[in-house]
Image: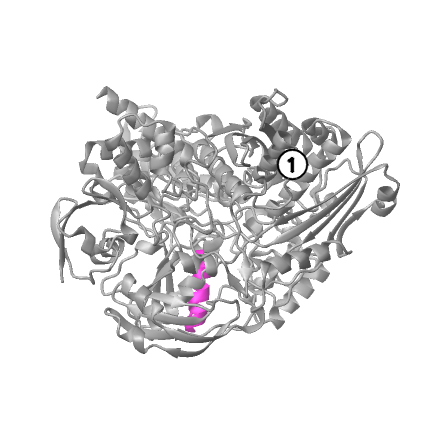
Amino acid sequence: MNARPDFINAATLDSKSRRRFLQSAAAAGGLVLIAGFPGQGEAADEPKKYGADGMPNGWVDNALAFVSLTPDGTVSIVCHRSEMGQGVRTSMPMIVADELEADWKRVKVVQAPGDEKRYGNQDTDGSRSTRHFFKPMRTCGAAARMMLEQAAADQWKVPVSEVEAKNHQVVHTKSGKKLGYGALAAAAMKQPVPSRDQVKLKDPSQFRYIGKGNIKLVDGRNIVTGKAVYGQDVHIPGMYYAVVARPAVYLGKVVSVDSSATMKVPGVVKVVQIEPSAPPANFNPLGGVAVVAKNTWAAIKGREALKIVWDDGPNASYDSKSYRATLEEASRKAGKVVRNEGDFDAAYASAPKKVTAEYYLPHLAHATMEPPAATCRIKNGKAEVWSCVQSPQNARDMVAKRLGMDPANVTMNVTLLGGGFGRKSKADYCVEAAVVSKAMDGAPVKVVWTREDDLRHDYLHTVSVEHLEAGLDDSGKCVAWLHRSVAPTILSTFVEGAKNQFNIELGMTLLQVAPTIPNVRVENPEASAHARIGWFRSVSNIPHAFATQSFIAEMAAAAGKDHRDYLLDLLGPPAKIDTRKQGDDWNHGENPDVYMFDTGRMRRVIDLATIKAGWGKSMPKGSGMGLAATYTFVTYVATVAEVEVDANGNVRIPRIHVAADTGAVINPERVYSQIEGACVMGMGVALYNEISFKNGRVEQANLNEFELARMGTSPVEVNVYLIPSDYSLPLGGVGEPALPPVAPAICNAIFAATGKRIRRLPIGNQLA
Amino acid sequence: MATRFTLNGNAVSSALEPDTPLMWVLRDEFGLTGTKYGCGIAVCGACTVHINGQAVRSCTTPVSAVAGKKVVTIEGLGADKIGRMVQDAWVENSVPQCGYCQAGQCMSAAALLHSKKNPSDADIDQAMGGNICRCGCYTRIRASIKEVAAKGGAA
């Protein structure tokens, strides 16, 4: 997602907060990037930039950067975003190929290294890749097509208006003469690139791949034959393998190291101390002791043999049980007011019916199937890194900074990512590899994170208590809404001591209260972070939506109304709402004049999901149906979960129905798969996932303790319904939006099935 | 102390310490990185290989335990008819998302289909229960196993 503060468009903060933010960032010595981006200076009167324009290094639609044609007829198309399962290596080149009239069978996908000057923003986060690069990729493809047409017209000495590119060849329409793309390649590549206003894009009716779902995954065959290369798989001749003993407690430090036993382990070559960086964490290594060996197992055994005395530092008493009480206490007192409309206190005091509830969501680990890994080699004053990173330019900059090099001398190669979910936006592991390679005189070193490392040293999803109070009138209508959200902020990873959620977190399903409620107050009491807080697929939308979508169901129950009808009434009649009027100045980075909150689209997905699910039908004893609906990453999603709760309190989820309105759908197959996957992940959040701390340490060591959804426990069916859309609507996000409604839909279904209201996740054995 | 075994049909010899898990031998010594590291304690299934035809977690199998045995990894799965059908079905149904777990999923699925021609949902839950997919491709994995079973039955 878009929470990395060096990606925050400072222009989206009001001028006062922006100045404060930049000052505190500078004072903390971190966040140098935020002030360094073009167009993000201090001037308060600068026009706001949105979408791809608002991202660091923006976008590029230069055909020469993305397309190359060779005489053998191969069309090479660069994918500048990172592949982590969302299908970007298929979808983005597919867009180019479509406009280019290329035959997909003759397209070769080339992965870009980290180079945002050349390719535009590469941060693969925030469900943004297709949303921001659909148009630039179309432009690249269309420009290359026109270059091919011009080259053919020149060769035939005919006006370009008489030629047409069609399926990998250019045809002279009058004579029927044809030239293949291979024959035209050299001449076409020498053509000037047509200027943007001269580029003729296809009419969508002419699309051959876009929106069709007829393209198989670029990497599919390599994946199932073991040929696909992930960060963990990189192999460089003469390479060493390293694992790192890191402080178990955040901000802990090495006092002393005895590596004598380690050096006796066969295969161990060297022990290297990695200096920690001063807080804030940013994407710096945690520090510790690296064991370098000739193979991974020797490095692991060598690490086990280290005798390290640690100073646990200031977070040694972090304890999730007592911290939950701290958050609850904070949520019951007034906090920083982040939205205030009408008079909540008066309306609440006079409301005949009151509903209050508190919801708890623990820390979550990304637990990507591939734990982080990075390989670095330093030679002749240049560093080269191979890694699974979501933000290769940032990784490159971080490595360059730590090595004291110009980023121009660092090459950041991007492998496939075995899952990302926001973890791999933070390239601390690349910096570790660079430090260890340097200590090995530049020899290639692969730093391998074990699963234990991954769970203990993640940039965790925050932990939160959401406190809600509502006043209902005699008819059950909500007239007063108070929401206090307390959670350590992502900002604390970049600004030491930050205690309040910032606009990106607030803009995720917290400020956007149902538009028909007249008296609204949203508060954000302070919370201190004692671990590295990062962003996890869908970010703050998860706790905020869990709370608000559960609470609306609780209000409906208190009012004696059907949940769906109640939710639709809260939304009110179809209307387009300016998100700024809801106090949200972020709007997922998009232009609020273009991307308005359309309650009509919201109503439509709710209708579709509930109709498909058979909402209201009678269910067997112990079974129930629950609904939740969210607008996140500028996409509308409604989810209906069906649950069965047995006599022992075990929850089974036979079916989930999801209706989504993502605007135009570019690669439907991947939209379906992303939504299916988000439902499984969301189910894990609801039922199993919890990272807890004791004595400052993560209690869960491996996947036997941090439980994930499996074949037999995940939803048996996930039925996805997409709202058809033409290209007149702006694109919405896809990778994240289906996750936030899953947990509240499941909990609402459990309430329908059992009458028991779940307010603390994970559900675990609460129903036993 | 070399350990000799058959790897995807070829006689090989590992020079690593005998307690080294087979997974690291395959990955670091033989460069067969299709077998993935996911947990190291046999709870995620990413490292699944076939040892004498059985699906086994290679992360907790010391290389010494495969001396004289036949090891097949994802790189060699296509030599087997059912293995190849599994791979084809995975591609055809666009099963993978990130793909990191899929080598293990394919190995477990192929082993299941060798032992049961028409596995039930419960069979699939049991045989595939040790393979985690964090991206959540389970419905497609289940459908693909059933598809291969249906085709296998017809063949």
Above or below: residue B131 compared with residue B82: below
Q: Is residue A217 magenta?
A: no
Residue position marked by numbered label 1 in the rendering: A756
Please, is residue A597 above or below residue A618 in the view?
below
- Res A635 seen here: yes
Q: At 46% from the left edge and 67% from the top edge, which residue is drawn?
A: A285
**Residue A263 image offset from top left, x and y in percent:** 28, 75
Q: Nearer the viewer, residue A61 or A642?
A: A642
Q: Position of residue A199 (x, y in %)?
A: 47, 39
Residue located at (34% from left, 51% from top) = A230
Give the extent of the magenta segment.
A391-407
SS assignment at label 1: loop
**What secondary structure predominates along the stretch shown in magenta?**
helix
Relative to the observer, which residue lies in front, A673 or B108?
B108
- Residue A642 in the image, given as x and y percentages of width and height: 55, 29
Which one is nearer the viewer's eye here, A327 or A597?
A327
The kind of residue tagged 1 is: Lys
Give the quadrant of residue A551: top right
Q: Chain of mark 1?
A: A
Q: List x then y, in percent, for residue A734.
A: 52, 39
| Lateral position of residue A185 relative to residue A362, left or right | left
**Quick one: label 1, few (<14), some, or many (20+) residues within 10 Å?**
some
For the point 60% across and 54% down, the residue is A463
Q: In front here: A322 or A31?
A: A322
Total numbered circles: 1
Say which quadrant the C terminus of chain A sits in. Answer: top right
For residue A97, which quarter of the picture? top left
Q: Magenta span has A397?
A: yes
- Determine whether A433 is above or below A155 in the image: below
Q: Is residue A585 visible?
A: no
